[in-house]
Image (tube, helix red, strand yellow):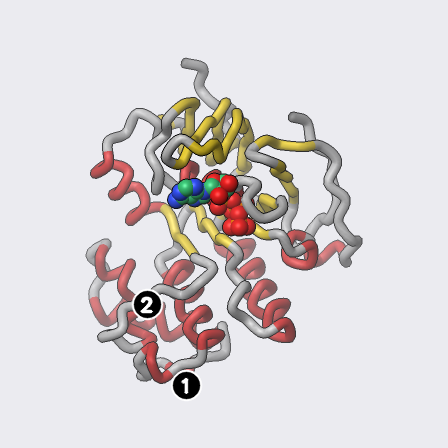
């Protein structure tokens, strides 16, 4: 087993994955550097979600290797992977999955409280992030009282309030109105950069990918070369790059 480079917070080698016999990843290798925002792009069904789920320890590794900070994830059992996800990773789904019985701030504070943070400190962090995402006035509302776009902002606040080492975001702005997407993504990117959070972002939207430092593109479960994204101002991230397979 070859250990990953020191400056990669996540590193995957020759990942293969099949869902009930149907192939989703066909030998993907990549490194994610500490603090970078990496976009994983590709058309529908190209394997983006499966790749993020393998990197985040949500799916067991069938073939290949995943390393987090020089620790092998591919040899971990389910409980160790669960602890890793709880303590070090954040996850944003394309559709907000909130606990219906809890209000917005309680939902956003949940991962911190699961880690043992006091209710008071967790509430302060949750409220701060709800404010930053412009839904501070929804803090006491239950999910059923919120619009889908507001629920997604709560889910984003929940993922980031716990200060994860790596934030996985699978089409995080899918339920948002187009006009809101840029603002929410900028908040997410600014927060990640100011807090040194590494972000792995799956998207098929070039505008979303343009906020990333680097892009990896998938097609039929494999990496492909030469992704060209539209130019954006330097302050918003670096837009285009060539890739090696
Ligand atoms: N639970 C599952 N059972 C069977 N096949 C699956 C399952 N999840 C994904 N697949 C298949 O694996 C392949 C990769 O899917 P995946 O969701 O990872 O791609 P994606 O790029 O994220 O697509 P999308 O943009 O539509 O979410 C597809 O062919 C998909 O149909």
Image quadrant in which the N terminus is located: top left
Residue 176 or residue 85, whichever sits in front: 176
Looking at the image, the residue that sits furthest to the top is 1
What mark, if any, has residue 155 been given in the picture? none
Looking at the image, the residue that sits furthest to the right is 231
Residue 223 visible in the picture: yes
Q: Residue at x 40, y 27 (%)?
A: 70
Q: Secondary structure at mark 2?
A: loop
Q: Residue at x 40, y 70 (%)?
A: 154
Q: Is residue 142 left or right of residue 169?
A: left
Mark 2 to mark 1 CA distance (whole Å): 18 Å
Q: Secondary structure at mark 1?
A: helix
Is residue 202 positioned above or below 76 on the image?
below
> Of tags 2 and 1, which is closer to the observer?
2
Residue 238 spot, x, y in % from top left:
71, 48
Residue 45 or residue 11, whichever sits in front: 45
- Looking at the image, is mark 2 or mark 1 earlier in the sequence? 2
Residue 28 spot, x, y in % from top left:
54, 28
Residue 56 spot, x, y in % from top left:
39, 41
Residue under numbered circle 2: 98
Query: Is the CB–ligand 1 distance for label 2 below 8 Å?
Result: no
Image quadrant in which the C terminus is located: top right
Q: Residue at x 48, y 23 (%)?
A: 4
Quarter of the rendering containing residue 130: bottom left
Badge 1 crowding class, 10 Å Cα cut-off, few under 14, some 14 to 19, many 20 or more, is: few
Residue under numbered circle 1: 137
């Amino acid at each position: 087993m070859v250990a990953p480079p020191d400056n990669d917070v996540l590193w995957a080698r020759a990942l293969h994955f099949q869902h009930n016999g149907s192939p989703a990843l066909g030998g993907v290798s990549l490194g994610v550097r500490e603090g970078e925002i990496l976009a994983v792009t590709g058309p529908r069904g190209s394997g983006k979600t499966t790749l993020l789920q393998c990197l985040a320890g949500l799916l067991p590794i069938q073939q290949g290797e995943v390393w987090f900070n020089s620790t092998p994830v591919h040899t971990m059992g389910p409980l160790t992977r669960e602890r890793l996800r709880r303590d070090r990773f954040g996850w944003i789904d394309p559709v907000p999955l909130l606990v219906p019985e809890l209000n917005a701030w309680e939902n956003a504070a949940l991962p911190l409280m699961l880690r043992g943070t006091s209710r008071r400190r967790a509430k302060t962090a949750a409220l701060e992030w709800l404010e930053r995402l412009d839904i501070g006035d929804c803090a006491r509302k239950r999910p059923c009282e919120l619009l889908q776009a507001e629920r997604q902002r709560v889910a984003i606040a929940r993922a980031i309030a716990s200060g994860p080492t790596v934030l996985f975001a699978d089409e995080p702005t899918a339920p948002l109105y187009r006009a809101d997407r840029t603002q929410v993504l900028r908040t997410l990117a600014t927060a990640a950069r100011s807090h040194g959070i590494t972000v792995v972002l799956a998207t098929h939207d070039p505008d979303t990918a343009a906020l990333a430092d680097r892009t990896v593109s998938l097609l039929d479960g494999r990496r492909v070369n030469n992704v060209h994204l539209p130019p954006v101002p330097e302050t918003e991230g670096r837009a285009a790059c060539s890739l090696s397979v």
